[in-house]
Image (tube, grey):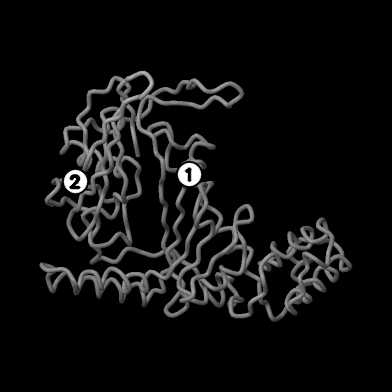
Amino acid sequence: MQQDYPEGGLPLVGTHVIERVDMETGEHLPPSVNQKVLEGSYSTKLTIRCNGNRVRVEGNPSRWQRMDNLFGLTQLDDCVAIYNHVLAQYGLPPFTKNTKLKHRQSQDGKRSGLIGNGAEITLIDWTRNHMVGARKEASFIRGMSSIQIGRGREPKLYPNGMTCNWGEASEWMMTKLYCKSFELKEHLRRDKRKKYGVTETQLNYIDQLIDYCAEQGVVREEHSLRQKLLKRHNLQFYGLVTEADFHEHLQDIENAMKTLHATHDTHLSIADQLISSGVVKSRQAANATQSYAVLWQQGVDLRSTLKRSQFYEHKSRLKAIGIDIGQQFDVSRMCPTLKRSEVIEVKPLSIPSWYQLPRVATTNVLPFHAYAS
């Protein structure tokens, strides 16, 4: 998040500053200040920067000064409150809500952009926890990795089979699914074992958390909405958007799970699935699409076999039942049926009574209050 103060005069905050001068006019330009890394309790970090005109903070407020963030903050105001406590420590003004917008001056021929009178969100991550059952996480993730999501965003399944992401290098958005117990074992527990001053009680809590995630089969869904997407949909203006305004951009995984419910139904052929799902109306059309699905499973490159229009017509039909012929066929990534009432039942994860929700904390940076939602 960042906020501009055109009048300037704010204290410089960073690790070093570079003064800049226009060599042609001799005019002093705004200084360049690099970010200052702040470390709180439990090895959590935020970065802060101010060049006198712009205040910027980066980092995960749900994770700040907590051992984990399996369950975090759910309100934008709570996240900003944590940022503002840190800003106050450095004599900087708090992030404020936008109350009005105006068009900024743009170059000739360029589309005019909007500018607000408050803070701007430049990146925001949203997460959700799914409970799929013990030892079913990898099967669930592999199955999801068999299909594109959104507008042709291709999956990338990690070699360990525990993480899949879509749009990793995208400037618009990145979506990820990963096994939470595996991630906690690989990072949280290992890191804490190396830290001096970590108590046995804290280590036991971490082990309890890992065991809980493993027993429930927790798969974490994560959406990273980046600056280009936020600006395209005017979601960057803090105070003029609500949490609900972001929800329509967080449905790709949910929609993909719905299409995968009949991926490998042993009682219905592909043609029968197409007809029963209403994707096609005639048996002839269903049989034609089924024949190309079989060729795809045999390794035939349908892009070079079919005309472009035909390829995308059959791809659209098959994707509606969870088969993506735009991806290379890989039998190891075709998972058990994801029908929620049958093989893998997907449920929201409940918060156990012993879980430590956000609370008042004191660190070497600043005492602050986080609100448990």
Contact check, label 1 and label 2, Cβ < 8 Å: no
Can you give x and y, in whole percent of width and height, for residue 104 in the image?
47, 22
* Vertical relation: 179 (above or below) 41: below
> In which image quadrant can residue 147 be found?
bottom right
Q: Secondary structure at mark 1?
A: helix
> In which image quadrant can residue 152 be found?
bottom right
For the point 23% across and 47% down, the residue is 370
Residue 113: assigned label: none
For the point 52% across and 42% down, the residue is 229
For label 2, the residue is 369
* Vertical relation: 184 (above or below) 60: below
Can you give x and y, in whole percent of width and height, for residue 81 in the image?
26, 40
Count neighbours of disc 2 (C-alpha within 10 A) and say few if under 14, some if 14 to 19, many if 20 or more.
some
* Distance from the alpha carbon under mark 1 to that under mark 2: 25 Å
From the image, which quarter does the N terminus lie in? top left
Q: Please state if 347 lies on the left or on the right of 215 as rendered.
A: right
Count neighbours of disc 1 (C-alpha within 10 A) and say few if under 14, some if 14 to 19, many if 20 or more.
some
Q: Which residue of the protein is positioned furthest toward the right in this rendering?
A: 284
Q: Amino acid at mark 1?
A: Phe
Can you give x and y, in whole percent of width and height, for residue 182 in the image?
37, 74
For the point 54% across and 73% down, the residue is 142
Q: Nearer the viewer, residue 317 or 160?
A: 160
Q: Please tell me which of labels 1 and 2 falls first in the chain.
A: 1
Q: Amino acid at mark 2?
A: His
* Vertical relation: 202 (above or below) 100: below
For the point 87% across and 68% down, the residue is 283
Q: Secondary structure at mark 2?
A: loop
Can you give x and y, in whole percent of width and height, for residue 154 in the image?
60, 61
Q: Nearer the viewer, residue 234 or 213?
A: 234
Q: Please state if 191 lies on the left or on the right of 343 as rendered.
A: left
For label 1, the residue is 246
